[in-house]
Each structure stands twice: as C-alpha cells, then as structure tokens.
Amino acid sequence: TYPHYWKHPYVPGTERRLLKVGKTDGAAFVRIRAQARQTGAPEEPLLLRVYVAPEPGTSERSFHRLLDAAEHSRNEGATAGREWFSTTLEFCDEIAAALRLEVLAADVT
C-alpha cells in the first residue's frame, strides 16, 4: 500500500484500507519499487507483508477469490489496478494462515 492509504481507512469507521495483493517470482520490495517508479507514484510504497508460497500463481488466485467472496471489494474500472482490495491486514493474514503460507511481517507503525 501507500502511506496515505495506510493512514486513512478506505471505509470510514473500519480498518479496511486499500491494499495491493499480488505476486512476484522475485524479491518483493524490488518489484514494488519498480512498479512505483513506472507509475510515477507520489509516495514511497509500504511493504506490509510477504506471504511465501510454493506456487505463487495458485496462491494469488486463491487469495483473490477469498477476498472477492468476502466482499472485500476490488477496484473496478478501465484504468484501476485489479490487485487493489478494500480489506484489512488481519483478514489477509487469516487467508494466508488458511492457505498455510509463511508470513513475513513488516513494521507498520
């Protein structure tokens, strides 16, 4: 996510924030910084979690299906990124636990 999204919940009165849930086959922060540079993002991205998966593509599809099923809305639109969800970090951690993924946490203070 980005600092602005982390500081300001997407759904007022909840902890639901815009979080990008995606996969990479390489180093997570390298991928995130590359994407931010390509899009000219106004802030440095925050890496909140890395979920280590033996099959990243399969785990990503399962993650997205579970977020969709729980109505943790996905951005829609012609130019909106399809990997952005209105969700909570805790819910993502629960999905990771259900999928038996290793969780690497970052400090988000």
Image: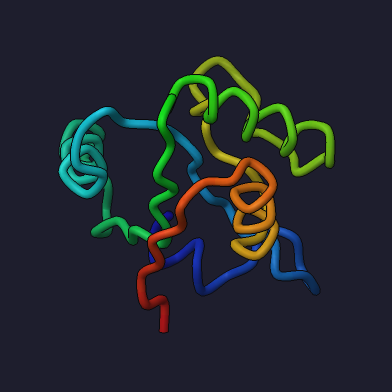
Q: Residue at x 50, y 61 (%)?
A: 5
Q: Position of residue 56 (x, y in %)?
A: 42, 27
Indicate the quadrant where residue 23 lies: top left
Up/down of 63 relative to 57, above or below: below
Query: What number of labels is visible?
Result: 0
- Left or right of residue 19, residue 41 in this image: left
Query: Is 108 or 92 nearer to us in this picture?
Result: 92
Q: Residue at x 67, y 34 (%)?
A: 74
Q: Residue at x 57, y 70 (%)?
A: 8
Up/down of 18 relative to 73, above or below: below
Indicate the quadrant where residue 46 lies: bottom left
Q: Position of residue 17 (x, y in %)?
A: 62, 59
Q: Residue at x 69, y 47 (%)?
A: 98
Task: Name the image quarter holding the C terminus.
Answer: bottom left
- Left or right of residue 83, residue 97 in this image: right
Up/down of 2 relative to 77, above or below: below
Q: Position of residue 7 (x, y in %)?
A: 51, 74
Q: Position of residue 79 (x, y in %)?
A: 49, 21
- Left or right of residue 86, residue 107 in this image: left
